Image (spheres, rainbow, N blue to C red):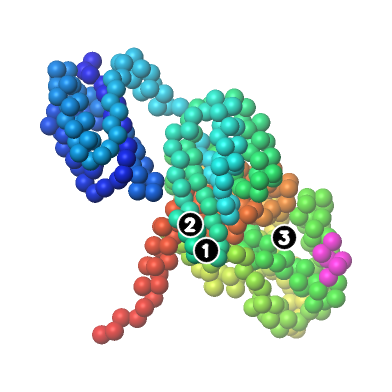
Amino acid sequence: MNEIILINITGRDRKGLDARFTAILAEYGVSVLDIGQAVIHEHISLGILIEIPVKENFEALYKDVLYAGHKMDLSIDIKPVEGVEYEKWVEERGKERRIITLLGKKLTAKEIAEVATVIYQNNLNIDHITRLSGRISLVNPQEKLRASIRMIVSGKPADTIGMRSKFMQISQETGIDISFHVENIYSGNRKLVAFDMDSTLIAAEVIDELAKLAGVGEQVAAITEAVMQGEIDFKESFKKRVALLKGLKVSELENLTKALPLSEGTELVTSTLKGLGYKLAILSGGFTFVGEYLKEKLGFDYVYANKLDLVDGRVTGEVCGEIIDGEKKALLLREIAERENITLEQTIAVGDGANDLPMINAAGMGVAFHAKPIVRERAGSAISTVGLDGLLYLLGIHEREINQDMTLKQYSSVPVRE
């Protein structure tokens, strides 16, 4: 086996640095076995693992690299790697890898330390750490603070369930969200995102708002809350609540729809995902008249919800067709995936209530959004501290990519003058 050398270069970053050192290595005909680089606040850390075909060239290469580092005021560390050690490293390439994403309005060393400790206690190694959120000005802070980092860890956890439980505890104590899931071939190849509607895409429960118009607000709200907590059956409770809406005018439905507030980040997340080629679906236990409005407004590809029965311009208190409950949502997710010719592993489901759990559990990635405790406990990922656009970070999308997408949309919307 030829000489294997690990070179670590650290110091102030500058243009041409990589070109200079790789040119030196090229003079000696080396093979690059591994390479990695990170730049933080204009300071670089560059690691290169190389194989020298002619052992006798090591001393000359060593001097050339050190001299170049001296001229550029960089710190250089060069050390040989034993062949046995290298082969052991190669054999570990098939290790399980997991993606852990931290998300909040602010991240401190305390939260990162607690997460890193859990990782260490489970015999995992942190291979990469990447900042997904943008740079933060201390003079002109952003209106909507976002902080997110992504860790890639390798190894088999000593206690996966215990690890999830500990992350949940850290999340509750610190107020940050921690996403934890296995990295696989589908992690960067999602194609379809299915959203719940009420209290997810919109910051309201439509049936509760309709109930207020009908004068039965408190009665319906109490039933809705019990359903979201998973305490009573969705279908039966839904029939009871809709019956109480009898007599509402169609005009009242239309006026309500236009007044419904979108959840924070809804427009950004949907426009960005559409721009990236995702298919978007609304799978809701709410109503079609709101779903169709959102489909047109936000560009959704599919909408499935419950249709209110109307006669002579008024609500009859009944629903047309099959009621969409949690199990139906999961079934619809599978049907859409088949229609789009993708696997369930390539889907994402986002929701807040217990009736969203079937589709959250069926999807390749399930996300609890400002959800009830029962949903957060069972979902692999959660967004509780920021808006719906937090989903973009969970997908590994960097803030600069989001901003670039927004800029392109703005540019493309400007009319061309002939």
Distance from disc 3 to disc 2, alpha carbons, whole Å, reads: 47 Å
- 56 drawn magenta: no
| Residue 128 seen in render | yes
* Label 1 secondary element: loop
Q: Are marks 3 and 1 in contact (CB under 8 Å)?
A: no
The residue identified by callout 2 is 136
Kind of residue indicated by mark 3: Ile
Kind of residue indicated by mark 1: Gln
| Residue 360 seen in render | no
* Mark whose residue sits in front, 3 or 2: 2
Question: What secondary structure do most residues of the magenta stretch adopt?
Answer: helix
Residue 339 at x, y percent in the picture = 50, 54
Residue 87 at x, y percent in the picture = 34, 18
Residue that appears at 36% across and 42% down: 38
Crowdedness near tag 3: few (<14), some (14–19) or many (≥20) residues, C-alpha within 10 Å: some
Any mark on residue 142, and which? 1
**Among the two numbered marks 1 and 2 on one chain, the one whose residue lies closer to the N terminus:** 2
Horizontal side, residue 216 vs residue 27: left or right: right
Horizontal side, residue 78 vs residue 200: left or right: left
State which quarter of the image contains the N terminus: top left
Q: Are marks 1 and 2 in contact (CB under 8 Å)?
A: yes
Kind of residue indicated by mark 2: Ile
Distance from disc 1 to disc 2, alpha carbons, whole Å, reads: 7 Å
The residue identified by callout 3 is 323
Horizontal side, residue 246 vs residue 143: left or right: right
Residue that appears at 31% across and 31% down: 8
Q: Is residue 238 above or below residue 231?
A: below
Read off the magenta span. Answer: 217-222
The residue lying toward the viewer, choosing from 330 and 169, is 169
Query: How many numbered marks are there?
Result: 3
The residue lying toward the viewer, choosing from 236 and 174, is 174
The residue lying toward the viewer, choosing from 59 and 47, is 59
